[in-house]
Amino acid sequence: MRVERVPFRLITAATAALILAACGEKQSAPPPQTPEVGVVTVQPTTVPVVSELPGRTSAFLVAQVRARVDGIVQRREFTEGADVKAGQRLYKIDPAPYIAALNTAKATLAKAQANVATQNALAARYKVLVAANAVSKQDYDNAVASQGQAVADVASGKAAVDTAQINLGYTDVVSPITGRIGLSQVTPGAYVQASAATLLSTVQQLDPVYVDLTQSSVDGLKLRRDIQEGRLQTGGPNAAKVSLILEDGRTYSEQGKLQFSDVSVDQGTGSVTVRAIFPNKDRVLLPGMFVRARIDEGVNNKALVVPQVGVTHDQKGQPTALVVGPDNKVALRQLVTSGTFGSGWVVDSGLNAGDRVVVQGTDKARPGSTVKPVDAQLPPPGAQGASGADASSAPAAAGASGAAASSAPAPASAAAASAASGA
Protein backbone atom coordinates (compact mmCIF):
# COMPACT_ATOMS: atom_id res chain seq x y z
CA MET A 1 0.00 0.00 0.00
CA ARG A 2 1.43 3.31 -1.07
CA VAL A 3 1.14 6.31 1.23
CA GLU A 4 1.55 9.72 -0.31
CA ARG A 5 3.22 12.38 1.76
CA VAL A 6 1.53 15.77 2.01
CA PRO A 7 3.91 18.67 1.76
CA PHE A 8 4.51 20.42 5.11
CA ARG A 9 3.75 23.79 3.67
CA LEU A 10 0.23 22.64 2.77
CA ILE A 11 -0.42 21.42 6.36
CA THR A 12 0.84 24.69 7.78
CA ALA A 13 -1.37 26.68 5.45
CA ALA A 14 -4.47 24.65 6.32
CA THR A 15 -3.82 24.98 10.05
CA ALA A 16 -3.34 28.71 9.76
CA ALA A 17 -6.59 29.01 7.81
CA LEU A 18 -8.54 27.18 10.54
CA ILE A 19 -7.01 29.30 13.31
CA LEU A 20 -7.77 32.50 11.44
CA ALA A 21 -11.35 31.33 10.89
CA ALA A 22 -11.75 30.57 14.60
CA CYS A 23 -10.36 33.93 15.56
CA GLY A 24 -12.72 35.60 13.17
CA GLU A 25 -15.69 33.82 14.70
CA LYS A 26 -14.50 34.71 18.22
CA GLN A 27 -14.11 38.35 17.34
CA SER A 28 -17.61 38.42 15.86
CA ALA A 29 -19.29 36.93 19.03
CA PRO A 30 -21.85 39.27 20.68
CA PRO A 31 -20.85 40.95 23.95
CA PRO A 32 -22.13 39.29 27.20
CA GLN A 33 -25.63 40.38 28.21
CA THR A 34 -26.43 42.23 31.46
CA PRO A 35 -27.86 39.63 33.89
CA GLU A 36 -31.55 39.96 34.67
CA VAL A 37 -32.69 39.72 38.29
CA GLY A 38 -36.10 39.80 39.92
CA VAL A 39 -36.58 42.55 42.51
CA VAL A 40 -39.25 43.53 45.01
CA THR A 41 -39.78 47.17 45.93
CA VAL A 42 -40.31 47.38 49.68
CA GLN A 43 -43.00 49.72 50.96
CA PRO A 44 -44.29 50.41 54.49
CA THR A 45 -47.05 48.03 55.52
CA THR A 46 -49.13 47.30 58.59
CA VAL A 47 -47.77 44.46 60.71
CA PRO A 48 -49.08 43.28 64.09
CA VAL A 49 -46.44 43.19 66.84
CA VAL A 50 -46.55 39.92 68.77
CA SER A 51 -44.40 38.92 71.74
CA GLU A 52 -43.98 35.34 72.91
CA LEU A 53 -43.31 35.05 76.63
CA PRO A 54 -42.87 32.06 78.98
CA GLY A 55 -45.02 31.74 82.06
CA ARG A 56 -46.91 29.54 84.49
CA THR A 57 -50.55 29.22 85.38
CA SER A 58 -51.97 29.99 88.82
CA ALA A 59 -55.42 29.66 90.34
CA PHE A 60 -57.79 32.62 90.31
CA LEU A 61 -58.61 32.07 94.01
CA VAL A 62 -56.77 29.91 96.53
CA ALA A 63 -58.21 29.16 99.99
CA GLN A 64 -56.41 27.09 102.59
CA VAL A 65 -58.87 25.30 104.85
CA ARG A 66 -57.48 25.39 108.40
CA ALA A 67 -58.73 24.42 111.83
CA ARG A 68 -60.20 27.29 113.86
CA VAL A 69 -60.97 25.29 117.03
CA ASP A 70 -59.20 22.49 118.87
CA GLY A 71 -60.63 19.00 118.69
CA ILE A 72 -60.77 15.55 117.14
CA VAL A 73 -61.80 15.22 113.47
CA GLN A 74 -64.83 12.95 113.43
CA ARG A 75 -65.34 12.59 109.67
CA ARG A 76 -64.46 13.94 106.23
CA GLU A 77 -67.40 14.78 103.98
CA PHE A 78 -65.88 15.34 100.51
CA THR A 79 -64.10 13.47 97.75
CA GLU A 80 -60.55 14.54 97.08
CA GLY A 81 -60.17 16.28 93.71
CA ALA A 82 -63.90 17.04 93.45
CA ASP A 83 -65.63 20.37 92.97
CA VAL A 84 -67.08 21.89 96.12
CA LYS A 85 -69.41 24.82 96.73
CA ALA A 86 -68.87 27.77 99.02
CA GLY A 87 -70.37 26.89 102.44
CA GLN A 88 -70.26 23.13 101.83
CA ARG A 89 -69.19 21.19 104.94
CA LEU A 90 -65.86 19.46 104.50
CA TYR A 91 -64.96 18.19 107.99
CA LYS A 92 -66.77 17.60 111.27
CA ILE A 93 -64.85 18.24 114.50
CA ASP A 94 -66.12 16.79 117.79
CA PRO A 95 -68.63 19.44 118.99
CA ALA A 96 -69.29 18.11 122.55
CA PRO A 97 -66.94 20.49 124.43
CA TYR A 98 -68.32 23.46 122.53
CA ILE A 99 -71.94 22.48 123.16
CA ALA A 100 -71.14 22.40 126.87
CA ALA A 101 -69.40 25.78 126.65
CA LEU A 102 -72.45 27.25 124.92
CA ASN A 103 -74.80 25.92 127.58
CA THR A 104 -72.58 27.41 130.31
CA ALA A 105 -72.60 30.78 128.58
CA LYS A 106 -76.36 30.70 128.25
CA ALA A 107 -76.75 29.92 131.97
CA THR A 108 -74.45 32.77 132.92
CA LEU A 109 -76.46 35.09 130.72
CA ALA A 110 -79.74 34.01 132.34
CA LYS A 111 -78.25 34.65 135.80
CA ALA A 112 -77.12 38.11 134.72
CA GLN A 113 -80.54 38.91 133.29
CA ALA A 114 -82.21 37.88 136.57
CA ASN A 115 -79.83 40.07 138.52
CA VAL A 116 -80.71 43.00 136.29
CA ALA A 117 -84.38 42.68 137.29
CA THR A 118 -83.43 42.73 140.99
CA GLN A 119 -81.14 45.72 140.64
CA ASN A 120 -83.70 47.67 138.60
CA ALA A 121 -86.32 47.19 141.35
CA LEU A 122 -83.83 48.15 144.09
CA ALA A 123 -82.75 51.30 142.30
CA ALA A 124 -86.37 52.33 141.70
CA ARG A 125 -87.22 51.81 145.41
CA TYR A 126 -84.17 53.76 146.62
CA LYS A 127 -85.05 56.60 144.32
CA VAL A 128 -88.35 57.12 146.19
CA LEU A 129 -86.79 56.68 149.59
CA VAL A 130 -83.93 59.07 149.02
CA ALA A 131 -86.43 61.73 148.04
CA ALA A 132 -88.10 61.29 151.48
CA ASN A 133 -84.70 61.15 153.21
CA ALA A 134 -85.53 57.56 154.29
CA VAL A 135 -82.17 56.28 152.97
CA SER A 136 -78.88 57.97 152.54
CA LYS A 137 -77.70 59.37 149.26
CA GLN A 138 -74.79 56.92 149.35
CA ASP A 139 -77.11 53.93 149.49
CA TYR A 140 -78.99 55.24 146.48
CA ASP A 141 -75.79 55.74 144.52
CA ASN A 142 -74.69 52.21 145.31
CA ALA A 143 -78.02 50.83 144.10
CA VAL A 144 -77.71 52.74 140.80
CA ALA A 145 -74.13 51.46 140.35
CA SER A 146 -75.22 47.89 141.02
CA GLN A 147 -77.95 48.32 138.42
CA GLY A 148 -75.39 49.41 135.80
CA GLN A 149 -73.09 46.53 136.68
CA ALA A 150 -75.95 44.07 136.26
CA VAL A 151 -76.67 45.48 132.80
CA ALA A 152 -72.98 45.11 131.89
CA ASP A 153 -73.05 41.52 133.08
CA VAL A 154 -75.94 40.84 130.71
CA ALA A 155 -73.97 42.30 127.78
CA SER A 156 -70.94 40.20 128.74
CA GLY A 157 -73.14 37.13 128.98
CA LYS A 158 -74.53 37.75 125.49
CA ALA A 159 -71.00 38.10 124.10
CA ALA A 160 -70.01 34.84 125.78
CA VAL A 161 -73.00 33.12 124.23
CA ASP A 162 -72.09 34.51 120.80
CA THR A 163 -68.48 33.32 121.20
CA ALA A 164 -69.62 29.88 122.24
CA GLN A 165 -71.97 29.68 119.27
CA ILE A 166 -69.18 30.76 116.89
CA ASN A 167 -66.81 28.15 118.27
CA LEU A 168 -69.51 25.53 117.98
CA GLY A 169 -70.04 26.59 114.37
CA TYR A 170 -66.33 26.15 113.68
CA THR A 171 -66.69 22.45 114.39
CA ASP A 172 -68.37 22.34 110.97
CA VAL A 173 -65.42 23.11 108.67
CA VAL A 174 -66.90 24.53 105.46
CA SER A 175 -65.39 25.56 102.13
CA PRO A 176 -64.79 29.32 101.94
CA ILE A 177 -64.99 29.45 98.11
CA THR A 178 -66.37 27.48 95.20
CA GLY A 179 -63.68 25.49 93.44
CA ARG A 180 -61.81 22.23 93.27
CA ILE A 181 -60.48 20.73 96.49
CA GLY A 182 -57.16 18.93 96.70
CA LEU A 183 -55.71 16.33 99.02
CA SER A 184 -56.91 15.98 102.57
CA GLN A 185 -54.05 16.66 104.98
CA VAL A 186 -55.78 14.97 107.94
CA THR A 187 -57.83 11.85 108.49
CA PRO A 188 -60.72 11.12 110.87
CA GLY A 189 -59.35 10.76 114.39
CA ALA A 190 -56.65 13.38 113.95
CA TYR A 191 -56.31 16.10 116.56
CA VAL A 192 -56.28 19.63 115.16
CA GLN A 193 -55.45 22.88 116.89
CA ALA A 194 -56.61 26.42 116.31
CA SER A 195 -53.41 27.87 117.79
CA ALA A 196 -51.32 25.95 115.22
CA ALA A 197 -53.83 26.66 112.42
CA THR A 198 -53.67 23.03 111.32
CA LEU A 199 -53.95 22.79 107.50
CA LEU A 200 -56.80 20.50 106.49
CA SER A 201 -56.99 20.94 102.71
CA THR A 202 -56.83 23.54 99.90
CA VAL A 203 -59.59 24.73 97.56
CA GLN A 204 -58.73 26.49 94.28
CA GLN A 205 -60.97 28.27 91.82
CA LEU A 206 -59.83 27.28 88.31
CA ASP A 207 -62.27 29.20 86.14
CA PRO A 208 -60.96 31.69 85.22
CA VAL A 209 -57.23 31.12 85.69
CA TYR A 210 -54.24 33.47 85.85
CA VAL A 211 -51.14 33.15 83.68
CA ASP A 212 -48.07 34.91 85.10
CA LEU A 213 -45.57 35.72 82.34
CA THR A 214 -42.03 37.06 82.53
CA GLN A 215 -40.79 39.75 80.14
CA SER A 216 -37.29 41.19 80.12
CA SER A 217 -37.08 44.81 81.17
CA VAL A 218 -35.29 45.60 77.88
CA ASP A 219 -38.20 44.30 75.80
CA GLY A 220 -40.67 46.17 77.97
CA LEU A 221 -38.65 49.37 77.58
CA LYS A 222 -38.51 48.96 73.79
CA LEU A 223 -42.25 48.36 73.66
CA ARG A 224 -43.04 51.51 75.64
CA ARG A 225 -40.64 53.57 73.52
CA ASP A 226 -42.18 52.33 70.26
CA ILE A 227 -45.63 53.30 71.54
CA GLN A 228 -44.45 56.76 72.61
CA GLU A 229 -42.74 57.41 69.28
CA GLY A 230 -45.79 56.33 67.30
CA ARG A 231 -44.32 53.23 65.67
CA LEU A 232 -46.85 51.07 67.50
CA GLN A 233 -50.55 51.59 68.03
CA THR A 234 -52.35 49.87 70.87
CA GLY A 235 -55.73 50.19 72.49
CA GLY A 236 -54.30 50.04 75.99
CA PRO A 237 -52.96 47.17 78.11
CA ASN A 238 -56.42 45.87 79.00
CA ALA A 239 -57.33 45.57 75.31
CA ALA A 240 -54.36 43.38 74.36
CA LYS A 241 -55.32 39.84 73.39
CA VAL A 242 -53.29 36.86 74.52
CA SER A 243 -53.17 33.32 73.15
CA LEU A 244 -51.54 30.32 74.85
CA ILE A 245 -49.32 27.52 73.59
CA LEU A 246 -49.57 24.50 75.88
CA GLU A 247 -46.80 22.15 76.95
CA ASP A 248 -47.64 19.69 74.16
CA GLY A 249 -47.32 22.41 71.49
CA ARG A 250 -51.03 22.86 70.90
CA THR A 251 -52.74 26.25 70.97
CA TYR A 252 -55.27 26.77 73.75
CA SER A 253 -58.76 27.24 72.35
CA GLU A 254 -59.67 30.30 74.46
CA GLN A 255 -58.35 33.83 74.12
CA GLY A 256 -57.17 35.70 77.19
CA LYS A 257 -56.81 39.33 78.23
CA LEU A 258 -53.85 41.17 79.65
CA GLN A 259 -54.52 42.24 83.23
CA PHE A 260 -51.49 44.29 84.29
CA SER A 261 -47.72 44.59 84.20
CA ASP A 262 -45.74 44.73 87.43
CA VAL A 263 -44.25 48.10 88.33
CA SER A 264 -40.95 46.73 89.62
CA VAL A 265 -38.09 44.81 87.98
CA ASP A 266 -36.76 41.64 89.59
CA GLN A 267 -33.16 42.48 90.48
CA GLY A 268 -32.10 38.86 90.18
CA THR A 269 -33.51 38.12 86.72
CA GLY A 270 -33.94 41.60 85.23
CA SER A 271 -37.53 40.82 84.25
CA VAL A 272 -41.02 42.04 85.05
CA THR A 273 -44.17 40.01 85.62
CA VAL A 274 -47.06 40.35 83.19
CA ARG A 275 -50.38 38.78 84.26
CA ALA A 276 -53.10 37.59 81.90
CA ILE A 277 -56.45 35.95 82.65
CA PHE A 278 -58.02 33.08 80.67
CA PRO A 279 -61.39 31.31 80.84
CA ASN A 280 -61.00 27.67 81.84
CA LYS A 281 -64.41 26.06 81.62
CA ASP A 282 -63.07 22.62 80.69
CA ARG A 283 -60.33 22.72 83.38
CA VAL A 284 -57.61 22.21 80.76
CA LEU A 285 -55.30 24.63 82.57
CA LEU A 286 -54.12 23.51 85.98
CA PRO A 287 -52.08 25.58 88.45
CA GLY A 288 -48.34 25.32 87.91
CA MET A 289 -48.42 24.39 84.20
CA PHE A 290 -45.64 25.81 82.00
CA VAL A 291 -47.04 27.66 78.98
CA ARG A 292 -45.96 30.17 76.35
CA ALA A 293 -48.13 33.17 75.60
CA ARG A 294 -48.38 35.25 72.43
CA ILE A 295 -49.33 38.83 73.25
CA ASP A 296 -50.70 41.19 70.59
CA GLU A 297 -48.87 44.30 71.70
CA GLY A 298 -50.03 46.60 68.91
CA VAL A 299 -49.68 47.41 65.21
CA ASN A 300 -46.63 48.73 63.36
CA ASN A 301 -47.86 50.85 60.45
CA LYS A 302 -44.36 51.56 59.11
CA ALA A 303 -42.93 48.06 58.89
CA LEU A 304 -40.81 46.98 55.91
CA VAL A 305 -41.39 43.34 54.99
CA VAL A 306 -38.92 41.52 52.72
CA PRO A 307 -39.59 38.03 51.29
CA GLN A 308 -37.49 35.41 53.00
CA VAL A 309 -35.81 34.40 49.72
CA GLY A 310 -34.31 37.91 49.55
CA VAL A 311 -32.60 37.73 52.96
CA THR A 312 -29.44 35.71 53.53
CA HIS A 313 -26.98 35.52 56.41
CA ASP A 314 -23.29 36.13 56.40
CA GLN A 315 -20.59 34.12 58.19
CA LYS A 316 -21.39 35.91 61.46
CA GLY A 317 -25.06 35.06 61.17
CA GLN A 318 -26.10 38.65 60.43
CA PRO A 319 -28.98 39.08 57.95
CA THR A 320 -28.06 40.71 54.64
CA ALA A 321 -29.82 41.63 51.40
CA LEU A 322 -28.80 42.68 47.88
CA VAL A 323 -30.28 46.03 46.84
CA VAL A 324 -30.34 47.45 43.30
CA GLY A 325 -29.57 51.18 43.32
CA PRO A 326 -30.82 53.90 40.94
CA ASP A 327 -27.84 53.19 38.63
CA ASN A 328 -28.78 49.47 38.52
CA LYS A 329 -25.71 48.55 40.51
CA VAL A 330 -25.97 45.97 43.28
CA ALA A 331 -25.11 46.86 46.87
CA LEU A 332 -24.97 44.62 49.95
CA ARG A 333 -26.95 45.85 52.96
CA GLN A 334 -26.66 44.74 56.58
CA LEU A 335 -30.14 44.32 58.09
CA VAL A 336 -31.65 44.29 61.56
CA THR A 337 -34.79 42.14 61.73
CA SER A 338 -37.37 41.79 64.49
CA GLY A 339 -39.14 38.62 63.42
CA THR A 340 -41.26 37.27 60.62
CA PHE A 341 -44.63 38.19 59.19
CA GLY A 342 -46.21 35.63 56.91
CA SER A 343 -43.47 34.52 54.50
CA GLY A 344 -41.29 37.61 54.97
CA TRP A 345 -38.83 39.17 57.38
CA VAL A 346 -39.75 42.36 59.24
CA VAL A 347 -36.77 44.70 58.78
CA ASP A 348 -36.16 47.35 61.43
CA SER A 349 -33.10 48.97 59.86
CA GLY A 350 -30.88 48.59 56.81
CA LEU A 351 -33.56 49.32 54.21
CA ASN A 352 -35.58 52.36 53.21
CA ALA A 353 -38.99 52.62 51.62
CA GLY A 354 -38.64 52.27 47.84
CA ASP A 355 -35.49 50.12 47.90
CA ARG A 356 -35.40 47.33 45.32
CA VAL A 357 -34.35 44.05 46.92
CA VAL A 358 -33.11 41.15 44.79
CA VAL A 359 -35.22 38.06 45.43
CA GLN A 360 -34.65 36.13 42.15
CA GLY A 361 -31.33 35.58 40.41
CA THR A 362 -29.25 36.32 43.49
CA ASP A 363 -26.55 33.98 42.12
CA LYS A 364 -25.99 36.43 39.21
CA ALA A 365 -25.99 39.59 41.35
CA ARG A 366 -22.70 40.53 42.93
CA PRO A 367 -22.03 43.67 44.98
CA GLY A 368 -20.85 46.37 42.62
CA SER A 369 -22.05 44.63 39.43
CA THR A 370 -24.64 46.06 37.02
CA VAL A 371 -27.89 44.15 36.56
CA LYS A 372 -31.18 44.52 34.75
CA PRO A 373 -33.93 44.63 37.41
CA VAL A 374 -37.41 43.33 36.61
CA ASP A 375 -40.41 42.81 38.84
CA ALA A 376 -40.12 39.44 40.56
CA GLN A 377 -42.80 36.85 39.94
CA LEU A 378 -43.29 35.38 43.40
CA PRO A 379 -45.83 32.66 44.19
CA PRO A 380 -48.85 33.49 46.37
CA PRO A 381 -48.13 33.49 50.13
CA GLY A 382 -50.02 30.21 50.58
CA ALA A 383 -47.90 28.48 47.96
CA GLN A 384 -44.63 29.98 49.07
CA GLY A 385 -43.32 26.82 50.64
CA ALA A 386 -44.47 24.54 47.82
CA SER A 387 -43.24 26.66 44.92
CA GLY A 388 -40.24 28.29 46.51
CA ALA A 389 -37.95 26.05 44.50
CA ASP A 390 -39.69 27.06 41.25
CA ALA A 391 -39.26 30.73 42.07
CA SER A 392 -35.54 30.30 42.61
CA SER A 393 -35.16 28.09 39.56
CA ALA A 394 -36.57 30.70 37.17
CA PRO A 395 -33.54 32.98 37.39
CA ALA A 396 -31.28 29.95 37.18
CA ALA A 397 -32.86 29.02 33.87
CA ALA A 398 -32.31 32.53 32.58
CA GLY A 399 -28.71 32.35 33.73
CA ALA A 400 -28.25 29.05 31.92
CA SER A 401 -29.57 30.47 28.66
CA GLY A 402 -27.31 33.49 29.01
CA ALA A 403 -24.32 31.22 29.47
CA ALA A 404 -25.31 29.25 26.40
CA ALA A 405 -25.54 32.42 24.33
CA SER A 406 -22.14 33.68 25.39
CA SER A 407 -20.49 30.30 24.75
CA ALA A 408 -21.80 29.81 21.19
CA PRO A 409 -18.37 30.31 19.51
CA ALA A 410 -16.81 27.64 21.70
CA PRO A 411 -17.44 24.71 19.29
CA ALA A 412 -15.54 26.42 16.45
CA SER A 413 -12.58 27.11 18.69
CA ALA A 414 -12.59 23.52 19.83
CA ALA A 415 -12.59 22.28 16.25
CA ALA A 416 -9.65 24.43 15.44
CA ALA A 417 -7.75 23.22 18.46
CA SER A 418 -8.42 19.59 17.65
CA ALA A 419 -7.33 20.08 14.08
CA ALA A 420 -4.11 21.66 15.23
CA SER A 421 -3.44 18.84 17.65
CA GLY A 422 -4.15 16.28 14.96
CA ALA A 423 -1.52 17.87 12.84
Image: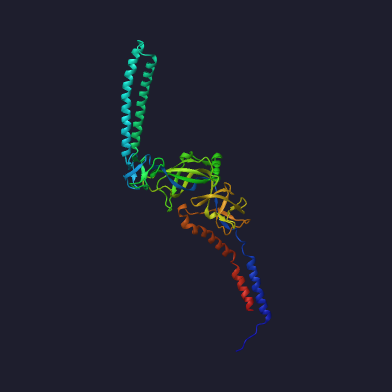
In the displayed structure, 149 sits above or below 191; it is above
Residue 330, given in percent of the width and then of the height, sits at 61, 54
Q: Which quadrant is the C terminus positioned in? A: bottom right
Colour mode of the rendering:
rainbow
Residue 377, given in percent of the width and then of the height, sits at 51, 54
Q: Nearer the viewer, residue 131 or 383?
A: 131
Q: How many marks?
A: 0
Would you say 81 lies left or right of 223 here? left
Would you say 291 lies left or right of 317 here? left
Q: Residue at x 61, y 75 (%)?
A: 418
Q: Which quadrant is the N terminus positioned in? A: bottom right
Q: Residue at x 33, y 19 (%)?
A: 120
Q: Nearer the viewer, residue 34 or 89?
A: 89
Q: Nearer the viewer, residue 8 or 243?
A: 243
Residue occupying the far bottom of the picture: 1
Q: Nearer the viewer, residue 247 or 136?
A: 136
Residue 214, given in percent of the width and then of the height, sits at 50, 46
Residue occupying the far right of the picture: 9
Would you say 327 lies left or right of 359 here? right
Residue 345, given in percent of the width and then of the height, sits at 53, 51
